[in-house]
Image (cartoon, rainbow, N blue to C red):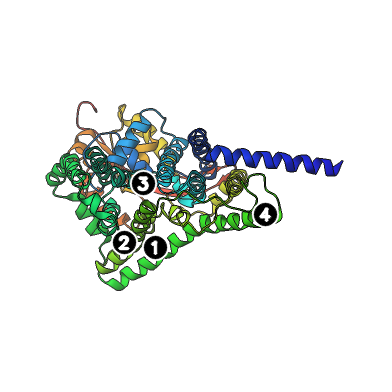
């Protein structure tokens, strides 16, 4: 009886594996299957992140993007406008709740995964393309690290779109493909100027590729340059109007005094990104080795001819493009950071390594059997479900260990609710403006039902959404965080600009599943409105 049960399980497993392999590789089924997998990944990880971070507030980058999205400007001081526009459109449909921010992040990740699969199909066969897709689903950038919607994360859509448009233009060499490439490059630049790394990489690929002559003699690359320039005209006009404020922000924030300092950050950047890449690479290596072992010892139902492998359908010309692009964006930024003494943040690598799985799968000598597809899918499912089960425990365990200085457990959502109620008791009108650093002001914008606009004191690159004159007319709540190293400068600004304000100390703390978080005593200033009514 036990042998019969084992045999039935083995037959079921074989049929299941064969079905997965067929769905992932069949020309008529693969698109729907891929879309379904991506949708399940995005939904499952939205739930995981919501549970995992239930004791935390959202990151202030996410709140900042929400604040930008309240007005559709051509730029927001520090960054180009696309991430704010996307957030504005998203929250015009979804509520301002934590889960909606994680759903936005996972939707961005899902769209990026779909584009990466489309890129893979231009280089390798459907079998390898699906393997690439699941490798990306295992890459922490596309799950754990993908919780924070900001311009860096949005580049997981726009930079793959640039690569896809380039591969299309390289193939077709038409005016139309050039227009699409130019638009893709403009969208990437409107997300973050860091996209110049990817645009430069495709430029280098076009110049050094063995088949470069046919591409460079076609209208595609030249039309792309013109289309990109035309699409960027409104934003460039805005840049000139604000005296190139985002460039000043970048210089003030990331310029270092010596190359030795830059080298320290480069080491951290490299180590961080290698560690993240190691997750999908090691898991994939285990699956591939496991698949080869089984094909030798067991007649596998998902193998077309026992241990023999089908010859992969490779497109060497496009593989060369992908290898060149990935090499340039992997090597160029660290070298540039050292040469120009720039603080290279680890998060800047979020958008630069999505081609690594494809670079490996594009090696013809690397065997990828059909059995590897259900195996790697099973690994993804097991990790996701285990994380889902552990998420509530992790949330409870980590909450009390965080300090009051941590933005995640500093009870900013509770502060927003308390301040909104206090403002309405005093002035019986909408709270329009909050004055504070990005880390404290932007969460007020997100969590308060009034969604006040943030004005950051002593900031040289304002978003353009609020001004000191508007703050004086409409009144404001000023907040200084005693755990912030800019507390004294914040208090000085309040003394200078909040004359006659009501000053109080407002304590907050978080209670999560019976556990009391750290207390923060916020220094709060209520400045009464001068205008007859707020907008």
Read off the residue under disc 4.
294
Read off the residue under disc 2.
333
Q: Earlier in the sequence, mark 1 or mark 4?
A: 1
Q: How many angstroms separate mark 1 from mark 2 (CA)?
A: 10 Å
Q: How many angstroms separate mark 3 from mark 2 (CA)?
A: 18 Å
Q: Earlier in the sequence, mark 4 or mark 3?
A: 3
Q: What's the mark number on residue 68?
A: none
Crowding at mark 1 (Cα within 10 Å: few <14, some 14-19, many 20+): some
Q: Which residue is depicted at the point 31% across and 68% down?
A: 262
Q: How many angstroms separate mark 1 from mark 3 (CA)?
A: 21 Å
Please state which of the two labelled residues, at mark 4 or mark 3, is closer to the viewer: 4
Q: Earlier in the sequence, mark 2 or mark 4?
A: 4
Q: How many angstroms separate mark 1 from mark 4 (CA)?
A: 38 Å
Relative depth, front residue between 191 and 205: 205
Query: Where's the C terminus, which quadrant?
Result: top left
Q: Earlier in the sequence, mark 1 or mark 3?
A: 3
Residue 368: x %, y % from top left? 55, 52
Read off the residue under disc 1.
269
Kindly indicate the quadrant of the structure image that contains residue 149. top left
Relative depth, front residue between 321 and 419: 321
SS label for mark 4: helix
Q: Earlier in the sequence, mark 1 or mark 2?
A: 1
Q: Which residue is depicted at the point 42% across and 37% down?
A: 104
Instruction: Say whether marks 2 and 4 touch (CB < 8 Å).
Output: no
Residue 285: x %, y % from top left? 56, 58
Q: Earlier in the sequence, mark 3 or mark 2?
A: 3
SS label for mark 2: helix
Read off the residue under disc 3.
160
């Amino acid at each position: 009886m036990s042998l019969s049960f084992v045999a039935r399980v083995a037959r079921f497993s074989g049929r299941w594996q064969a079905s997965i392999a067929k769905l992932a590789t069949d020309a008529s089924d693969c698109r729907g299957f891929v879309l379904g997998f991506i949708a399940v990944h995005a939904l499952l990880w939205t739930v995981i992140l919501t549970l995992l971070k239930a004791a935390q507030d959202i990151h202030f980058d996410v709140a900042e993007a929400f604040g930008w999205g309240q007005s559709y400007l051509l730029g927001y001081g520090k960054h180009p406008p696309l991430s704010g526009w996307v957030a504005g459109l998203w929250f015009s449909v979804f509520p301002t709740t934590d889960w909606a921010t994680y759903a936005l992040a996972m939707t961005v990740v899902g769209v990026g995964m779909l584009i990466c699969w489309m890129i893979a199909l231009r280089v390798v066969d459907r079998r390898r393309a699906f393997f690439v897709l699941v490798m990306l689903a295992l890459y922490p950038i596309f799950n754990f690290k993908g919780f924070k919607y900001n311009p860096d994360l949005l580049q997981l859509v726009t930079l793959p779109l640039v690569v896809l448009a380039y591969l299309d233009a390289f193939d077709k060499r038409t005016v139309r493909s050039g227009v699409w490439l130019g638009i893709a490059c403009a969208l990437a630049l409107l997300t973050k100027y860091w996209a110049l790394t990817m645009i430069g990489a495709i430029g280098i690929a076009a110049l050094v590729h063995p088949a470069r002559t046919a591409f460079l003699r076609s209208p595609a690359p030249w039309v792309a340059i013109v289309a990109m320039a035309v699409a960027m005209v409104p934003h460039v006009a805005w840049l000139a109007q604000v005296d190139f404020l985002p460039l000043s922000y970048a210089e003030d924030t990331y310029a270092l005094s010596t190359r030795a300092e830059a080298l320290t950050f480069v080491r951290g950047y490299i180590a961080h990104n290698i560690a993240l890449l190691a997750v999908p690479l090691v898991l994939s290596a285990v699956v591939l080795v496991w698949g080869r072992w089984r094909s030798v010892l067991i007649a596998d139902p998902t193998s077309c001819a026992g241990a023999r492998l089908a010859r992969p359908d490779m497109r060497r010309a496009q593989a060369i493009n992908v290898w060149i692009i990935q090499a340039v964006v992997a090597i160029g930024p660290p070298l540039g950071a050292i040469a120009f003494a720039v603080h290279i943040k680890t998060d800047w690598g979020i958008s630069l390594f999505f081609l690594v799985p494809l670079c490996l799968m594009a090696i013809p000598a690397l065997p990828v059997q059909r059995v590897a597809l259900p195996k790697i899918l099973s690994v993804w499912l097991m990790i996701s479900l285990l994380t889902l089960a552990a998420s509530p425990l992790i949330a409870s365990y980590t909450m009390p260990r965080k300090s009051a200085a941590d933005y995640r457990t500093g009870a900013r959502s509770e502060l927003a609710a308390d301040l909104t109620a206090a403002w309405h008791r005093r002035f019986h009108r909408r709270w329009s403006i909050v004055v504070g650093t990005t880390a404290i002001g932007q969460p007020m914008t997100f969590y308060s039902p009034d969604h006040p606009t943030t004005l950051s004191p002593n900031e040289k690159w304002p978003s353009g959404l609020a001004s000191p004159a508007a703050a004086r007319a409409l009144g404001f709540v000023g907040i200084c965080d005693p755990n912030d190293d800019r507390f004294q400068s914040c208090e000085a600004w309040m003394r200078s600009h909040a004359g006659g304000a009501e000053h109080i100390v407002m304590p907050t703390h978080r209670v999560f599943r019976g556990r009391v978080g750290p207390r923060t005593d916020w220094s709060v200033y209520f400045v009464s409105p001068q205008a007859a009514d707020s907008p």
